Image: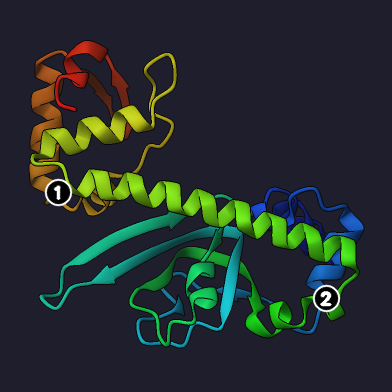
């Protein structure tokens, strides 16, 4: 591994919830453990697939990963996208002792991913010094709490009765004080996330723009009328 590649890994992990409050030396000691691995995935390749055994957690170093689930009818439901270096995914499955994944993770573009096996956590107190072990436990608790919070938001979203209600809730939960939306997914990604068809989403967004509720500029969405938007909550 080159110095540049090593620096990229350390920099990504500095932004990871798993390594919050870690020093660079502590991060280096983590990635040098025998139960950790760093792998490059080509565009379109799977990090894991449905029915694989969940025995690792993953941290994105660089690239873009999509986590999705296929229904029996063949429809893809987007669970989440992993696009920020340091973002962790699939950790819940490993700790809940589930026998197999019911979702898959695929590299949307060439990606580098750090994996940490369950063996590392089973022997965590012996693998690394006590201070780092305590940090990891604390960080994992914070991550699980945030995951639970985000999941409750997804449940609220799926419980909305109309496409417009789903759009309104999504925009309000991802807006800044100026009305800008912090996430700008493609129409396909957003339709998968909201569990609606892409044509229906595009049509409803167009209607909302005509009514002066939002403004569209490519992927960018800006809230024009907060009051009108909140009527659909």
Visible in this render: residue 187? no
Residue lying at 91% horizontally and 69% vertically, measured from the top left: 129
In the rendered image, which quarter is residue 131 located in? bottom right
- Quadrant (top left/top right/bottom left/bottom right) for the N terminus: bottom right
Picture disc at residue 66: none
Residue lying at 74% horizontally and 50% vertically, measured from the top left: 20
Distance from the alpha carbon under mark 1 to that under mark 2: 49 Å
Residue lying at 83% horizontally and 75% vertically, measured from the top left: 125
- Quadrant (top left/top right/bottom left/bottom right) for the C terminus: top left
Residue lying at 43% horizontally and 47% vertically, measured from the top left: 149
Q: Nearer the viewer, residue 218 or 56?
A: 56
Q: Position of residue 34 (x, y in %)?
A: 79, 84
Q: Position of residue 178 (x, y in %)?
A: 42, 13
Q: Which residue is mark 2?
A: 125
Relative to 121, 100 lies left or right: left
**In the rendered image of this protein, does residue 11 appear above or below residue 9?**
above
**In the rendered image of this protein, does residue 35 appear above or below residue 85?**
below
Relative to 183, 161 lies left or right: left
Q: Which residue is mark 1?
A: 198
**In the rendered image of this protein, does residue 69 appear above or below residue 21?**
below
Visible in this render: residue 38? yes
Q: Nearer the viewer, residue 230 or 189?
A: 230
């Amino acid at each position: 591994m080159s110095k540049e590649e090593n620096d990229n890994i350390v920099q990504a992990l500095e932004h990871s919830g798993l390594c919050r409050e870690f020093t660079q030396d502590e991060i280096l000691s983590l990635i040098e453990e025998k139960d950790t691995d760093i792998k490059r995935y080509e565009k379109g390749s799977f990090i894991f697939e449905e029915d694989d055994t969940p025995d690792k957690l993953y941290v994105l170093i660089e690239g873009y990963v999509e986590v999705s689930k296929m229904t029996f009818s063949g429809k893809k439901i987007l669970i989440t996208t992993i696009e920020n270096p340091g973002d962790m995914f699939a950790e819940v499955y490993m700790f809940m002792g589930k026998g197999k994944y019911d979702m898959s993770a695929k590299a949307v573009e060439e990606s580098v991913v750090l994996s940490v096996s369950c063996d590392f956590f089973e022997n965590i107190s012996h693998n690394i010094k006590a201070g780092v072990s305590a940090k990891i436990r604390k960080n994992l608790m914070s991550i699980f709490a945030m995951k639970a919070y985000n999941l409750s938001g997804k449940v609220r979203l799926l419980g909305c009765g109309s496409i417009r209600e789903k759009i309104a809730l999504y925009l309000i939960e991802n807006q800044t004080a100026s009305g800008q939306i912090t996430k700008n997914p493609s129409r396909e990604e957003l339709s998968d996330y909201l569990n609606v068809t892409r044509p229906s989403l595009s049509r409803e967004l167009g209607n909302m723009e005509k009514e002066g509720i939002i403004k569209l500029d490519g992927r960018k969405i800006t809230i024009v009328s907060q009051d009108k938007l909140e009527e659909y909550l």
